[in-house]
Image: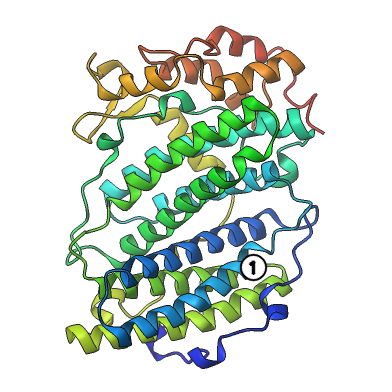
Amino acid sequence: MNILKEKGISLDKQVKTWQDIVKRPFNRDMVDNYTRTRQILMNGIEVEAWGFKHCWVRKLDDIELKKILVSIRRIEDMQQTTMNWLTPSRQTVLDTTLGYEQVAVDLTSWLAQNEPDSYVKETFDFGLLEDFDHLYRYSQFANLIEETDPNEILHNMTDVLLARPTQYHHNCNAIRIRNPYDKDKTSTQTKVNILTLVSAEQQTHNFYAEHGFMYGNTDLKRLYAEICDVEEEHVTMYETLIDPNETMYEKWLLHEFAEACCYYNCYKDETDERIKQIFEEMFMMEIEHTKIAAQHLEKYEKRDASEIIGEEMIEPCHFESQKEYVEKIIKKETNKRVDKDGTFNTVDKLDDAWASYAIQEATCKYGAPSEQAVHLAINTHCRDIASGKESLLNMQSELLEKSLEKYQAPNTVSPKMYDKFSEIDSKIYLY
């Protein structure tokens, strides 16, 4: 499909009534887990598109172009409201948090396996293990605070166990900076993949920053603060892959095209007919947004949009279980770190002066909330809350041993403690 030759919904017909904007939410207990992940992702995609246009308009002196941008931005704001508010009120913050981390794990896995640039793929794989560990830490509190089996949300499609421990995700942010792609040599697939993941990670950060305070439990608040900080690092890591030399018209076109591709993927994959129709309508709206961006690229830069987005749709957001791929990366990369020059290294080869040690010592001086989450689960259940095949669960001690750094938070759960978990059935306390 060549999106530039498709017929969409004209911009003047995209303004909706409040009744059309605010739709009936899905059912927390009956919704397919990947309907939820698609909804969460598209909320983040719209927030990124909206924010991009705000940043551009603030530095733009072309009044006619401003009128176009703010008109589309209003529609995107309405789209974001529709997508975000499909969340039911009885889905708790922790429920939604598990959904956000399932997005992060399964989306990043999909993108890594469908990324043609090896440097970008390696970056995706590195971030994947951190989000996988976040899911594990939040799952402890979902069970302890709300008596929720994480699989009520995950539907057994994503495993729950430790990976690279969250206490080791706190880096000197400067070393998270990646080398940008070359806009004239890089595939459209890579550009859309990166924009999709930046949008998802940015919205994850925003959700934690805006909702983490809503629980009375101080340990849980601190966990939200800790992981929110890591999501800030993830946004830095992914957004710096983007070529800063892209013009604003190129960036605009790529944003609209990425939105269109994601909505189209969601429409194709969606199993709930009502939600599928919403995705289809949003896609038809994005066709028009993409065509308007293409027209302005031609008007201001005398360039054909197909030079940038090609003539085929991209598939950046197919959701399916990624257990096998995640297991492969866990076994291979839990001991991997970002080194001082932005390259990757293993724990045993880090210099004593590695800049991230200072950050970890400063933030975790009195203990890591992510480790406290497991301690609280042990105090209640004699083991952690975990879900996955037995052979992988029994490897947790080995994975942790391989991943431990020179600096350890004073409340670090030891490999010996994880050894004892194998004596206790992990399913006893999951409902």
- Say which residue appears at 68% left-offset and 18% top-offset: 376
Q: Is residue 12 left or right of residue 360?
A: right
Of 112 and 287, nearer the camera is 287
Horizontal and vertical percent for residue 317? Answer: 49, 61
Q: Residue at x 27, y 74 (%)?
A: 60
Among all residues in the image, which is located at the extreme top?
416
Residue 370 placement: quadrant: top right
Image color mode: rainbow
- Residue 214 visible within the image: yes
Nearest to the observer: residue 366 or residue 189: 366
**Residue 70, x across and y down, in percent:** 42, 79
Query: Which residue is found at the position 49% from the left and 42% from the top?
Result: 325
Residue type of the residue flagged with mark 1: Glu
Whether residue 387 is visible here, answered yes or no, is no
Pick whichever, 226 or 318, lies toward us: 226
Q: Position of residue 92 (x, y in %)?
A: 73, 46
The answer to whether 12 is drawn above or below residue 50 in the figure is below
Q: Would residue 314 appear left or right of 425 to someone viewing this image?
A: left
Is 241 situated left or right of 418 in this image? Answer: left
| Residue 260 vs residue 72, the one in the foreground | 72
State which quadrant residue 278 falls in: bottom right
Find residue 338 and report its horizontal and vertical position in percent.
29, 31
- Badge 1: how crowded within 10 Å, few (<14), some, or many (20+)? many
Q: Is residue 12 above or below residue 360?
A: below
- Quadrant assignment, res 349: top left
- Residue at left offset 56%, top offset 43%: 208
Q: Quadrant of the C terminus?
A: top right
Q: State which quarter of the image contains the N terminus.
A: bottom left
Q: Which residue is mark 1?
A: 270
Numbered marks: total:
1
Examine the rendered structure and indicate whether residue 405 appears above or below residue 229: above
**276 to 198, vertically: above or below:** below
